[in-house]
């Protein structure tokens, strides 16, 4: 089986690529290297002893996408490739719509030409729920006006996929709404590689702990939560990678040529920023330099998943603990800095 993995050198893509190779799938990794590093390919090889086919392609380039589908025959597609900086998207919204939505549309144009229904997994985000009125969030919750163009672009992509499904075209789709992925592969050979100053909490924590950043700012401690800081559902990247294998197997084995499903992917447990900091300090035996600062614009207060749908329908749930995730994140940071 040959699987196209777009954005396969990125954070979630690289971990999923490793598992796909370990499961015996052939993969074609497509990445434009705009927010990733070609060395990740070598590290995937170090972990798996397998070298995937690699194509450096900007998926906005329609001709290049057509050529990709002429050069290879795919049994499945996992579409990770997207810009993902919430901040950047506010300053450059067009970049987010043209890349995130445009790339998907180019791929869909090719899917429409295929004879057999393709197995397609799409990376979405819990951001499509905005600030939900109740917790935990289940898949039937209304999609709210997104807080950022990034979030809006994910929502538009979901709509594009729904339109394709509604048009009666045969294709099998699972859309995954990720909560907050953290951590790294146990080998510490691949992990999250933020460009510049990290926006996300865990890379900021590890960079502060190693001394690259002076101090972590906790964005607000006056929210209506138990300790006043925001609550999120942090999922180990290895669990998140694994769910793609489960979904792919489901798609491949299904006889329903128009299977169309949306699942939350999280642990179902909410953790506050302060709780997360303290767990990081305890499991890694480190004192973290942090201070309380202003709220960050656009942050939702609380978001954690109701995970019952994916558990019931795919018999899937997370296996790794938050402690493990925070240990692996620290090991990854140590490994990144071992030569410095
Ligand atoms: N936080 C801090 N200090 C930091 C960074 C983050 O206190 O330096 C806090 C945030 O305020 C938030 C929590 O840590 O309360 C988690 O923040 P992240 O930036 O790590 O994650 P978000 O929940 O904001 O972002 C995630 C995904 C995005 C997605 C978004 C939707 O990373 O892709 O959820 O809300 F768009």
Image: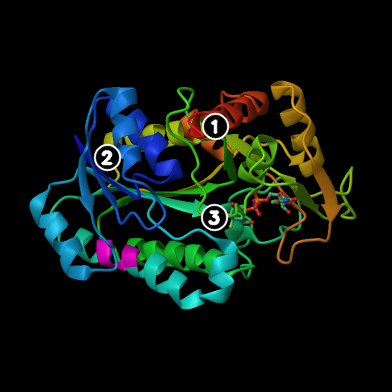
Q: Is residue 99 left or right of residue 295?
A: left
Residue at 27%, 53% in the rendered image: 171
Q: Main secondary structure of the magenta part?
A: helix
Distance between the Cα atoms at labels 2 and 1? 21 Å
Q: Is residue 107 left or right of residue 307?
A: left
Label 2 belongs to which residue?
A: 255
Distance between the Cα atoms at labels 3 and 2? 46 Å
The tag on residue 196 is: 3
Q: Residues within 10 Å of mark 3 (few under 14, many from 20)?
A: few
Quarter of the image holding residue 107?
Answer: bottom left
Which circle, 3 or 2, is nearer the viewer? 3
Residue at 56%, 34% in the rendered image: 333
The residue lying furthest to the left in this view is 71
Q: Is residue 235 left or right of residue 336?
A: right
Q: Earlier in the sequence, mark 1 or mark 3?
A: 3
Q: Earlier in the sequence, mark 2 or mark 1?
A: 2
What kind of element bears circle 3?
A: loop
Q: Nearer the viewer, residue 120 or 321?
A: 321
Residue at 33%, 40% in the rendered image: 39
What kind of element bears circle 2?
A: loop
Quarter of the image holding residue 180?
Answer: top right
Q: Which residues are magenta?
A: 103-108
The tag on residue 311 is: 1
Residue at 51%, 29% in the rendered image: 338
Kindly check if marks 3 and 2 are in contact, taking CB atoms under 8 A apart as contact: no
How far across and how far down the image is residue 104, in percent?
Answer: 33, 63
Which circle, 1 or 3, is nearer the viewer? 3
Does mark 1 have its CB less than 8 Å from ligand 1?
no
Judge whether residue 115 is colored magenta. Answer: no
Q: Nearer the viewer, residue 123 or 142?
A: 123
């Amino acid at each position: 089986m040959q699987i196209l993995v777009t954005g396969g050198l990125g954070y979630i893509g690289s971990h999923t690529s490793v598992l796909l190779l370990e499961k015996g799938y052939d993969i074609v990794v497509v990445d434009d290297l705009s927010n990733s590093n070609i060395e990740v390919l070598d590290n995937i090889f170090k972990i798996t002893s397998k070298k995937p086919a690699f194509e450096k392609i900007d998926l906005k380039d329609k001709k290049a996408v057509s050529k990709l589908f002429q050069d290879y025959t795919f049994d499945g597609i996992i579409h990770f490739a997207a810009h993902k900086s919430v901040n950047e998207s506010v300053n450059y919204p067009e970049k987010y719509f043209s890349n995130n939505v445009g790339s998907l549309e180019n791929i869909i144009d090719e899917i429409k030409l295929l004879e057999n229904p393709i197995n397609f997994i799409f990376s979405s985000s819990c951001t499509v729920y905005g600030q939900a009125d109740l917790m935990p969030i289940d898949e039937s919750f209304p999609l709210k006006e997104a807080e950022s163009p990034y979030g809006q672009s994910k929502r538009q992509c979901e709509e594009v996929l729904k339109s394709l499904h509604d048009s009666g075209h045969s294709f099998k789709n699972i859309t995954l709404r990720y909560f907050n992925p953290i951590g790294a592969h146990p080998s510490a050979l691949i992990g999250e590689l933020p460009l510049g100053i990290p926006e996300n909490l865990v890379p900021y924590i590890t960079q502060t702990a190693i001394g690259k950043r002076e101090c972590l700012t906790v964005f607000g401690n006056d929210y209506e939560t138990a300790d006043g800081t925001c609550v999120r559902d942090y999922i180990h990247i290895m669990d998140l990678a694994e769910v793609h294998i489960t979904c792919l197997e489901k798609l491949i084995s299904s006889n329903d040529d128009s299977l169309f499903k949306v699942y939350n992917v999280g642990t179902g447990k909410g953790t506050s920023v302060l709780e997360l900091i303290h767990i990081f300090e305890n499991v890694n035996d480190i004192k973290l330099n942090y201070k309380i600062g202003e709220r960050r614009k656009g942050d939702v207060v609380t978001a954690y998943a109701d995970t019952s749908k994916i558990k019931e329908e795919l018999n899937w749930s997370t296996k790794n603990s938050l402690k493990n995730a925070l240990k692996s994140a620290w090991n990854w940071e140590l490994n990144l800095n071992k030569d410095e």
